[in-house]
Amino acid sequence: MRFRIKPSSAFLPLILAIVLILGMLIGVKLVDRSGDRSMFVYPKTDKLSGVINFIEMEYVDKVSREDLVEKTIPELLKNLDPHSVYIPASDLQRVTEPLEGNFEGIGIQFNMLNDTVVVIQTISGGPSERIGIMPGDRIVMIDDSLVAGVDMPDTDIVSMLRGLRGTTVTVGVKRQFIPGMMEFEIKRDRIPLYSVDVAYMIDDETGYIKISQFSRTTFREYMEAAERLNALGMKKLILDLRGNGGGYMDQATSIADQFLDEGKLIVYTEGQASPRSDVKATSNGINLDTEILVMMDEWSASASEILAGAIQDNDRGMVVGRRSFGKGLVQNQTMFSDGSALRLTVARYYTPTGRSIQKPYDAGSDDYFNDLDRRFLHGEFDAADSIRFDDSLKFVTPGGNVVYGGGGIMPDVFVPRDTAGITGYYTQVTRQGLVYRFAFDYSDSNRATLSRFDEAGEISAYLDRQGLMDRFVEYAEDQGIARKTSDIRKSYDILHTQIKAYIARNIIDNEGFYPIISEIDQAFQKSVSLIGEGTRRNLTHAY
C-alpha cells in the first residue's frame, strides 16, 4: 500500500532525531487535542520504538513506519563521525560489489560514444569474449530494447547487462565492415574485478605496481604480480597508491608484511569499546630485500595510509607525493534482517610510531569533506603543507627520521601537482573530452594494424611516425576548437603523450597506457630518480 505524505511530514525524521538526541529524562505524557487518549513513553522502554509507535498511531496524516525509520537512522549517524553510515538494502550490493573482487554480468568494458554503447575491451575469459564479442563492437539492442541513439544513461545500460549468474541476455551488435546486425545470446557469469591495475619492469632492476583499491582479492593479485616481477630480476619496487581510497585493512597489512621483518608493528587499532589490537609482521615476506618506495596523493586513504605508514614508520622505505586524505577510522558492519547494513566507527588506526591517521572532523561532515578543496585553494598541492613543521605533531621513527601526524601520511619527498603544458587550448580540448574521443576513433579505425603490437613501446614508436598532433588539431577544429599555435606548442608533449597512451589502452589495456603516460608523470619520474638512493634516510626537509 502506498501512503500520501504531506510536505510537513518531510520534517519528521529531523524532529524525531532531535527528540532522541535530547532524550527523555522522565516519562512524558502525550495527549491528543481532545484530551481523550494518552500514551506514556517510559524511561526503561525503547524510546525510538516508542516515539515511532506514537507518531504512527497519532500523527495527523498517514505515514509509513518503514520510510520514517529509513530516513531517521541517517539523521542519527550524522551526529557521530563522517564515516558511520547506514546503507539501505537497495544500495548494499552497489556499495559492496567493488570491494568483493567480482560481479555477475557479461564481462565487457564499454563507453558511450554518440549515444551508442561501444565495447572497449572484453574481460579475458569472460562470457562475452568466449562467445565472440570484440572490441569496437557497437551494442544496438539489449533484449527487446533499443539502446543506440536514445540517450540512455550509463547506469541503465549497466543494469540491463548485469544479472544473476546463469541467466541470459541477448545483444544486437553492429560490427565495422560487417553488414546488418549480429545477434549474440550471452550467458551471464561471475566476472573478476582487478585492483592491481598494472605491474611491469621499468628497467632491469626496478618494478612498478599500481593498486587502485584494497578489495578481497588485492593481496592475491599483489603476490602474483610481485612474484612475476621478482622472477624478472626486481630488486627495487615503486608501489603506486595514488588515488587509492582504501578498502579492506587485512589486504593492506598483508602486503606490508612482505617488506617487514618478523615482529615489526604494522598498525594498531584502539577505541572506547575496542581494546588496543596490534598487527605485526610475520616471517613470510617475499620482498624483505626489495627496496620500496610508495607513491601517494591527496586521494590516497584508509588502507593505503596504513600501508604507507607501516613502510615509513619502520624506516623501510620512503613516501613520495603529497599528504594523503586522512581517513583513519575503523568501521564494523552490522547486517539487518531486511538486507540493509550499518557501518559504525568503533576504533581508530594508528601507525607504528603512534600517529593517528584520522584528520579532525569536529566542524562537521560538510567541512570534513570540503577539506581537499580548502587545501587546493590554500596552495597545498603546489607547496609543502604547513602542518609539516608543527612540532606538536612530530614523531620520530626508530631510525631517527621525523614524521608528522595531524591527519594523513606526510610524504618524505613532496611533489607538487604538475601544471606544465596546461594552456587555454589544452583546457578546452580536455573539458570536451576530445583527447579521449580522438584516441578512440583512431584506435577504432586502425585496430587491425595496431593489434599487431604486444607492448607499449612498440605502439608508442609506431604512433610517433603517424603525425598524430596534426590530425588531432584538425579534429579539434572540426569540433569547434580554434587552432592556437602558441598554446599547442606549449601543450604539445602532454597532448601527444596522452593521445598515444589512450590509443595504447584501447589496444592492450593498462599494459599499454601506464608505461606511456609515465613519460609525463612528474611524480613517477621523481620516484624513479629516488628509488636508487637507498631504503630510507632523513628526509625531513626534502621539499
Image (cartoon, rainbow, N blue to C red):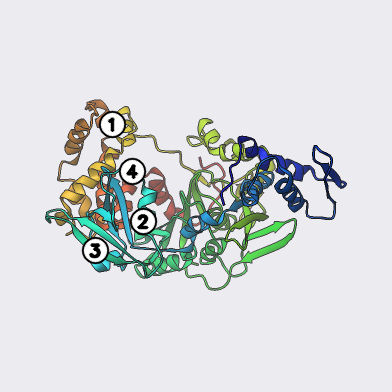
* Inter-mark Cα distance, 4 to 2: 39 Å
Q: Residue furthest right?
A: 26
Lower position in the chain sequence, tag 4 or tag 2: 2
Q: Residue 191, position in %: x, y?
A: 38, 65
Q: Is residue 493 something that shows in the picture? A: yes
**Amino acid type at mark 2:** Met
Q: Residue 42, position in %: x, y?
A: 85, 51
Q: Which residue is mark 1?
A: 490
Front disc: 4 or 3? 3
Q: Residue 148, position in %: x, y?
A: 26, 48
- Label 1 crowd bin: few (<14), some (14–19), many (20+), radius 10 Å: some
Q: Secondary structure at mark 4?
A: helix
Lower position in the chain sequence, tag 1 or tag 4: 1
- Label 3 crowd bin: few (<14), some (14–19), many (20+), radius 10 Å: some
Residue 520's disc is 4
The answer to whether mark 1 and mark 2 are in CB contact below 8 A is no
**Amino acid type at mark 1:** Lys
Q: Is residue 266 above or below residue 114?
A: below
Q: Which residue is mark 3?
A: 184
Front disc: 1 or 2? 2
Q: Secondary structure at mark 3?
A: strand
* Inter-mark Cα distance, 1 to 2: 44 Å
Is 368 placed left or right of 275 in the picture?
Answer: left
Is 173 placed left or right of 390 in the picture?
Answer: left
**Amino acid type at mark 3:** Phe
- Label 2 crowd bin: few (<14), some (14–19), many (20+), radius 10 Å: some
Residue 432's disc is none
